[in-house]
Image (cartoon, grey):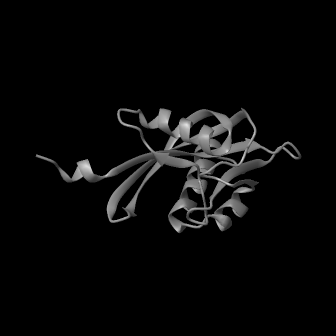
């Protein structure tokens, strides 16, 4: 017997941030996915049995080339995707080391100020995650 929860697509991702190498201000990493021609936070479906945080960090690494130090959990987003409910758990994560190389999923990344990141995100639902990151990690303006 299956429940509706069995059909929910489980995914995880991070709002990846760093201090600008130029002026030390907070920058947020967005990924461009050519398949959807959109700008979003790095995220993806969990593998069977994979813990959500481990999956979120794996997706960051696969999509951006960066390792990340996870922070606190951010709001979970729920929305329909391809006719099925999807749940994406997010964490704040600071980029620690790495280098982007285009791949089959992501052809470009951008490091943007929080305001520019909010404006560039394709899906309005993703914008609140930027605000949540700032509230959690930088209670005084960055």
Residue 43: percent from the left, percent from the top?
A: 53, 48
Residue closer to the observer: 141 or 69: 69
Can residue 142 be seen by looking at this rendering?
no
Residue closer to the observer: 101 or 59: 101
Residue closer to the observer: 73 or 140: 73
Q: On screen, 118 above or below 45?
A: below
**Residue shown at 46%/50% (left/top)?**
75
Residue 84 appears left or right of 117: left
**Residue shown at 72%/63% (left/top)?**
116
**Residue shown at 68%/39% (left/top)?**
65
**Residue shown at 40%/33% (left/top)?**
50
Residue 57: percent from the left, percent from the top?
A: 55, 36
Residue 19 appears left or right of 60: right
Q: On screen, 57 above or below 6?
A: above
Residue closer to the observer: 118 or 31: 31
Extreme residue toward the left, this view: 1
- Quadrant position of residue 114: bottom right
Total marks placed:
0
Residue 8 appears left or right of 22: left
- Quadrant position of residue 85: bottom left
Can residue 14 be seen by looking at this rendering?
yes
Residue 63: percent from the left, percent from the top?
A: 62, 45
Extreme residue toward the front, this view: 104
- Quadrant position of residue 70: top right
Q: On screen, 38 above or below 44?
A: below
Residue 135: percent from the left, percent from the top?
A: 59, 49
């Amino acid at each position: 017997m299956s429940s509706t929860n069995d059909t929910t697509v489980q995914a995880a991702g991070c709002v990846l941030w760093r201090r600008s190498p130029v002026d030390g201000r907070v920058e947020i990493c967005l990924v461009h996915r050519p398949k959807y021609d959109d700008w979003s936070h790095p995220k993806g479906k969990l593998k069977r049995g994979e813990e959500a945080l481990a999956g979120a960090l794996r997706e960051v690494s696969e999509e951006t080339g960066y390792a990340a130090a996870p922070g606190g959990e951010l709001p979970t987003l729920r929305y329909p995707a391809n006719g099925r409910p999807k749940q994406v758990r997010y964490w704040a994560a600071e980029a620690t080391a790495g280098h982007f190389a285009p791949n089959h999923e992501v052809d470009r990344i951008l490091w943007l100020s929080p305001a520019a990141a909010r404006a560039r995100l394709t899906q309005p639902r993703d914008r609140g995650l930027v605000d949540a990151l700032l509230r959690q990690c930088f209670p005084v303006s960055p």
